[in-house]
Image (spheres, rainbow, N blue to C red):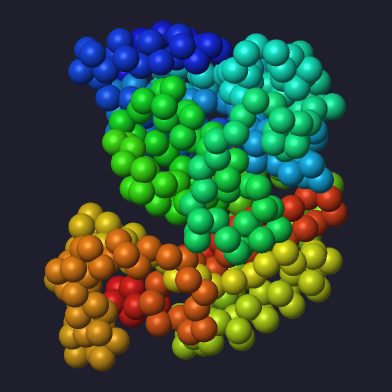
Amino acid sequence: MATKEPEIITDKTQMRNWSRAMRSQGKTIGLVPTMGYLHEGHLSLVKQSHRHANLTVVSIYVNPGQFSPSEDLSTYPSDFHGDLRKVMSLSKAVDVVFHPHNLYDYKNNFKNNDVNDSKRSESGNAGSGVVSCVEEKGMGHETWVRVERLEKGLCGKSRPVFFRGVATIVSKLFNIVEPDFAFFGKKDYQQFRVIQRMVRDLDFGIEVIGSEIVRDEDGLALSSRNVHLSPEEREKALSINRSLFRARSSAEKGQINCKELRDLVIQAINDAGGRIDYAEARLETLYTLYGRMKTEPMAPNVDQSSFLEYAYFKHLTYLLNSTSQIVDQESLEAMEEIKSPVVFCIAAWFGKVRLIDNMEINIMKHFCN
Ligand code: AMP
């Protein structure tokens, strides 16, 4: 547990040395990667890390590699001093704030593209006047991590370099910080799955832990980008979470046709004046289900008199007996009917702001409770 204010480290060698020194003392390290402009969603990850690990590192770095030239890097909000105040409000839960200037600067010669420069941070935008896609200008970085199947579709469709940039920067952070645990919000559901898969496929010795979505009182998922919504747009954006909750309750009442649920959601968001990027039900990974079963055994509560409950129980038993197949099925496949746990994912524009949200729908669990 931290005994003083967090140390601020900007240099990657210093960061690695700190981690190695702590690990040599037998301490475990939790990493919470963020792009700053922190809110309660980020802080929930920090609290989770504080519970799991001896020491917590929060990284604050707006990653240019995940923005394509047409995206909002130059207007991404930033307030480093405000972030520090929020981190410090968590009564010593954070040991290090890792705030590198430019993680693609290998020769120290990219000063003009220094998106995390503290002067710019004070301006309130993380990347004003900087290049968005690092590859475009050949900034000396050539190696990209691709999670080939999972990065396609959903956010990957309209943001073609996004997951490549995320997987690459997270790999870099993992190599610099060398954490034991890394915490990701399920608000960015596809991202969470991409990172889980990358860690498995590339044998990172890190446990990836997902954290539930934190919402405002009115249900809007917290996001750094919410600051760009006008009051009217924010009100309209509530159609996202409201329609997701409605879709879940319709599914629980027996509407398991994904197209019908999708139409319901799209209609509600269009009526509110939003512009849909995507609205899709995807198979929630069976790997998750297996993880849940281990921490949250359901079998004793299952009343096997109902066919659905029985089927669910059989399903779980099968999963527990066939771990390798479970991992093979980690997929985010598109679904036509809600027969297995699904995650309903949405991205929609309100004005110039693109918001994402999702809802896990598990009608089997609903029947079993
Ligand atoms: P960002 O700074 O937006 O890149 O987010 C950093 C981390 O915080 C990611 O793992 C996000 O999924 C997570 N996060 C962002 N918003 C929320 C939220 N409302 N609830 C839970 N986690 C979140």
**Residue for point 74% across, 14% down:** 111
Quick one: quadrant of the N terminus? top left
Q: Quadrant of residue 73?
A: top right
Q: Quadrant of residue 142?
A: top right
Tell me: residue 99, above or below residue 142: above
Does residue 136 appear anywhere in the picture? yes
**Residue for point 38% across, 63% down:** 330
Percent from the top left, x then y, of residue 110? 72, 17
Percent from the top left, x then y, of residue 4? 41, 8
Tell me: residue 20, above or below residue 139: above
Does residue 238 appear anywhere in the picture? no
Left or right: where 165 falls relative to 47: right
**Residue for point 38% across, 10% down:** 17
Left or right: where 339 falls relative to 135: left
**Residue for point 29% across, 36% down:** 205
Percent from the top left, x then y, of residue 274? 80, 64
